[in-house]
Image (cartoon, rainbow, N blue to C red):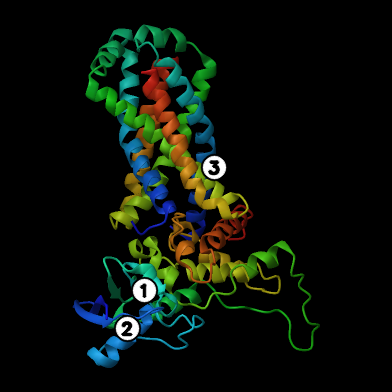
Amino acid sequence: MKQPSSYWAAMVHRLSGVALALFLPLHFWALGQALGGAEKLDSFLAWTEQPLVKFAEWGIVVALAAHLAGGLRVLALEFLPWRDWQKTLAAAAAAATLAAGLAFALAL
Amino acid sequence: MNVKLQSYLWIAQRASAAVLALCVCVHLATLIYAVQGGLSAAEILGRTRGNTGWFAFYTLFVLAVTVHAPIGLRSIFSEWLGWRAASRDVVLALFGASIAVMGMRAVFAVFA
Amino acid sequence: MSVVRVSVWKGAAKGAFQDFEVPRHPSQTVLDVVTYIQRALDPTLAYRFACRVGMCGSCAMMVNGVPRWTCRTHIDKVLENDSLRIEPLHNLPVIRDLVTDMTVFFDKWARARGRFHGRTNRRDEVARVRPDSENRKAADAGIECIGCGVCYSACEVVAWNPDYLGPAALNRAWTLAMDERDAANRERLRAVAGDAGCHACHTHLSCTERCPKQISPTAAIAGLKRAVAGAALRGEL
């Protein structure tokens, strides 16, 4: 479309942040299940074996990697001396995200 | 909220981001390692229970997220939802507090 | 004789696109097209231009969704399906047709303390400013701004947040913050900080992408963010 690549990098950063903010309460609740003993955590882990949940898990890991990469882009733009290759930071962030997503998918 | 406080929010956001950059790298590496061969509670808790090092690490992680997430959402609420009243910041502070409480509960559950 | 199909915004906040067919010529600019429409097809069309050679910025309009200087935009570079859609600059109130009210743009310039405040008078020595000092180089990177409004129209944050001072005003504030002769920097940093100031910039770089003078307001705003943070931590804000 018309916007520069940095705009899309910022959008991915923002939307992945929202996804993570929504995910965290669920994540903390699930881990907190361990307070009831290993069996309680295991019953939750059994639920996560479903393919749709595994896919969502992968999505969240990609969101985390994307948000990290996008955040590093912002920190670089705001704190490092300005250079002409700034725009390629968006591409670098995308590449790093993809790598992390692939690593997780292969590990699953 | 005056511009001085808003400036402190920006500083807090970047500082927590720097802390989270390190925490997330460690977390991503750890979970990619741990998820291989499937997850089981016994396997996870066997590694984590009583581990003071990881307990401290994840406490730091939870605190950094408690600062970072609400400030991030603040811009989205004001720019995309048009929510600029003081109630926005109250709701976000409550969200932050609940993240802190639930996060520390999880840290205790897994690492204590 | 080939033609260009042109859709032009007619009206104000409420209005409609009107379609025209304009004879196509080599090296034709968008301003040539608009001028032809007003002279030959629709004398009621309101639009702005002045120098027509890329110096004044008056002819800035949205061309196929992108803010540009129409006098410096060859239609060959921007045609979509052999057609053009021409609108008034985004993020500004429309007076009529392609003419916008730039009052708020310049009000924000003033609110960002975009004015030089000297601390000497004509009896003092002329200031000696090294052109290769880091601060002067930073200022020089932004001083060519002519206030055309293209960056302001390109900025999504301006669209989302009506109070946001915007890239041009903040860029100018930065050039003055980097000017060692200026005495008003404390007030200026206070003026550009906060939700309506530099902290609202989310580094989309739309401004930098579109600036016809190749200025990077994002770089200037990053500088302001660092300067404001330093001032805040030192208790000077």
Circle 2 is placed at which residue position? C34
The relative height of residue C181 versus residue B18 in the rendered view (above or below) is below
Residue found at the far front of this picture: C1
Do marks 3 and 1 share a subunit? no
The relative height of residue C132 versus residue C118 in the rendered view (above or below) is above
Callout in the foreground (3, 1): 1
Q: Position of residue A30 (x, y in %)?
A: 31, 21
Badge 1: residue crowd in 10 Å (few <14, some 14–19, many ≥20)? many
Q: Position of residue B32 (x, y in %)?
A: 43, 21
- C-alpha separation, residue under disc 3 versus residue under disc 1: 47 Å
Badge 3: residue crowd in 10 Å (few <14, some 14–19, many ≥20)? some
The one nearer the camera, A99 or C91, is A99
The mark total stands at 3
Query: Does residue A104 appear to the left or right of C174 in the view shown?
Result: left
**Residue visible at 47% across and 88% down in the picture:** C51
Circle 1 is placed at which residue position? C75
